[in-house]
Amino acid sequence: MRNLRVWLLIGVWVTMLGPTMQAQNGQLFGGYSFERIAPGCGSNYRCGSPSDPGAGTNLSGWAASLAGYFHKPLGLEAQFTGDYNGSASISYSTISRYTFQFGPVFSFHAGKAKPFVHALFGGVKQVSSADQTLAYTRLLWTVGGGLDWKASSRFSIRLAQVDYERQSVPVVDTGGPTPFPPIGVNGLRYSAGVVVKF
């Protein structure tokens, strides 16, 4: 219920700010995503104990975002990603991770370069092909930024976007009578692709 209230508040926020955005100041990004989840459970999310956090893992996929600048250089951004890996080493179950986040973005122009920074808040949903103990939905927050290079009046190339991610992960298969609380996990995401301005 708590997560539902959070998403309702985010939806109201986006709905209220949407009409104030100028269409000519919008941009749509799509491209490649590489996500590195640091040791802290990796793709297993089967942390045996805080002293045995498990290995890190790498995932590849896609990233997309929509941003509108209602008061230059400040805007509002919605970002969605999907990342996939081969298998979790204990269960050999294919893992898919999807994120959905919203938050403020700040950018400025320096010639053809357009650096930006953002802070995004939302959730991550992990899906497992076989092992449901690896499936969950959790809150996720991200801070980061990147650099766009203007190719024409309508198109830019996103040379790099680097984001730090933080989420909590449920601990399963502890091997003891008392389960451990969720463990905080760090992630790092690199994205690159094409930006369309409208």
Image: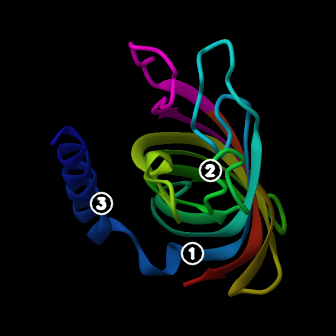
Residue 81 position in % (x across, y down): 57, 64
**Quadrant location of the N terminus?**
top left
Q: Which residues are magenta?
A: 162-185
Q: Is residue 184 left or right of residue 55?
A: left
The span from disc 3 to disc 2 (Cα, nearest Å) is 39 Å
Within 10 Å of the Cα at label 2, are there few (<14), some (14-19), or many (20+) other Cα atoms?
some
Within 10 Å of the Cα at label 3, are there few (<14), some (14-19), or many (20+) other Cα atoms?
some
Eyeballing the image, is 156 above or below 54?
below
Q: Residue at x 76, y 34 (%)?
A: 55
Give the residue pinned by disc 2.
91
Image-quadrant location for residue 101:
bottom left
The residue tagged with tag 1: helix, strand or loop?
A: strand
Residue 189 position in % (x across, y down): 71, 50
Q: Residue at x 59, y 27 (%)?
A: 47
Eyeballing the image, is 63 above or below 190?
below
Residue 178 belongs to magenta span: yes
Q: Residue at x 72, y 47 (%)?
A: 89
Residue 122 position in % (x across, y down): 41, 48
The three-letter amino acid code for the residue at tag 1 is Gln
Give the residue pinned by disc 3.
14
The three-letter amino acid code for the residue at tag 3 is Val
Q: Which mark is residue 27?
A: 1
Q: Is residue 166 left or right of residue 115?
A: left
From this viewpoint, is residue 114 visible? Answer: no
The span from disc 1 to disc 2 (Cα, nearest Å) is 41 Å
